[in-house]
Image (cartoon, rainbow, N blue to C red):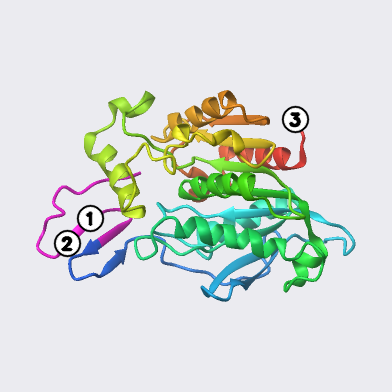
Amino acid sequence: MFSYNMDAAKADVAKDLSPFIILYKDGRIERLIGNEIVSPSQDPKSDVLSKDVIYSKEARLSCRLYLPKGVDPNKKLPLLIYIHGGGFCVESAFSPAYHNYVNLLVAEAKVIAISVDYRRVPEHPIPIPYDDSWAALKWAASHVNGDGPEEWLNKHADLSKVFLAGDSAGGNIAHHVAMRFGQEKIIGVNVAGIVLINPYFWGEEPIGNEVNELERVLKGISATWHLACPKTSGCDDPLINPTYDPNLSSLGCSKVFVSVAEKDLLRDRGLLYCETLKKSGWVGVIETMEVKGEGHVFHLFKPASDNAVAMLKKIVSFIHGQN
């Protein structure tokens, strides 16, 4: 998943965080993956419609909206806000992997969705990705009376049933948006739940399956966090290690779904998050799923696999309150 190149001191390289990103001493930034984008469309497989709209004129930020096939014009649907991963520094809401997965999710769950494109690090360090995602939620909230700027949301978004979802760094962001919602609230909006897929949480001292990992890999995960948040206190900063957050019990939703993967180095952090949340005094329901034999964000690479389909069905059941 992560690697840390110990030869980063090469002549023109300031920091090498392959396979994600390389920073050069002259200020250049080379993103090694996640640069391809696809246009919104009517998906030929699912018939899900998508289009891109601006959610922040000030920051010139767009998101991709998704509407499932055959929507009753008088029916409101749960609103899913999906936040992409990529170590805070690569990928986008418009990349093929995310576009394809959100199409699948919208078709299966019969929800209306917003896929958030936030500003990425290192040009825009944390908390900017958090703030951008919060701005997307606030923009969605502007449709609560049916007179917002986007007609799909006016007609079809049930803002009493909002779900925040994300994988890897996007899972981290979704958690923090839910934390902010718990403390600030937004009139007319209810964040019913959050879906965290292989969330990017970390810590200073290795736990569980991290103990046997190569030191260079552990350093790579730590270095990625320090790149994302240069002013961080370290890997026990509550922003990356929510088990150290004294306000964890104020998480602003009533249910949480966390999916971890057996072969993912972040697995035990996701499980520890669930255990800590249960003990924090937070009043809500936690569902967990461990996917056997899979690695980090496998659902993006093989969305049609049995394990990815099983996870998708679990997410759908979670959104619609089925056991």
Residue 185 placement, left or right of 123: right
Residue at 57%, 70% in the rendered image: 62
Rendering quarter of residue 142: bottom right
- Circle 2 — which element? strand
Q: Where does the image place residue 34, in percent across and percent down from the top left? A: 41, 61
Whole-Å distance between the Cαs marked 1 and 2?
A: 7 Å
Residue ID for mark 1: 16
Residue 240 placement, left or right of 13: right
Where is 48 relative to 234, above or below? Answer: below
Q: Where does the image place residue 229, in percent across and percent down from the top left? A: 36, 52
Residue at 77%, 71% in the rendered image: 151
Residue at 56%, 27% in the rendered image: 280
Q: Residues within 10 Å of mark 2 (few under 14, many from 20)?
A: some
Task: Confirm whether residue 268 shows in the render.
Answer: yes
Residue ID for mark 2: 13
Q: Amino acid at mark 3?
A: Asn
Farthest left residue in view: 11
Which badge, 1 or 3, is on the more N-terminal residue?
1
Main SS of the magenta part reads loop
Q: Amino acid at mark 1?
A: Asp
Residue at 69%, 54% in the rendered image: 186
Position of the C terminus, as image quadrant, is top right
Q: Amino acid at mark 2?
A: Val
Q: Where does the image place residue 29, in percent across and percent down from the top left? A: 28, 67
**Dots 1 and 2: beta carbons under 8 Å?**
yes
Residue ID for mark 3: 323
Residue extent of the magenta highlight: 1-22
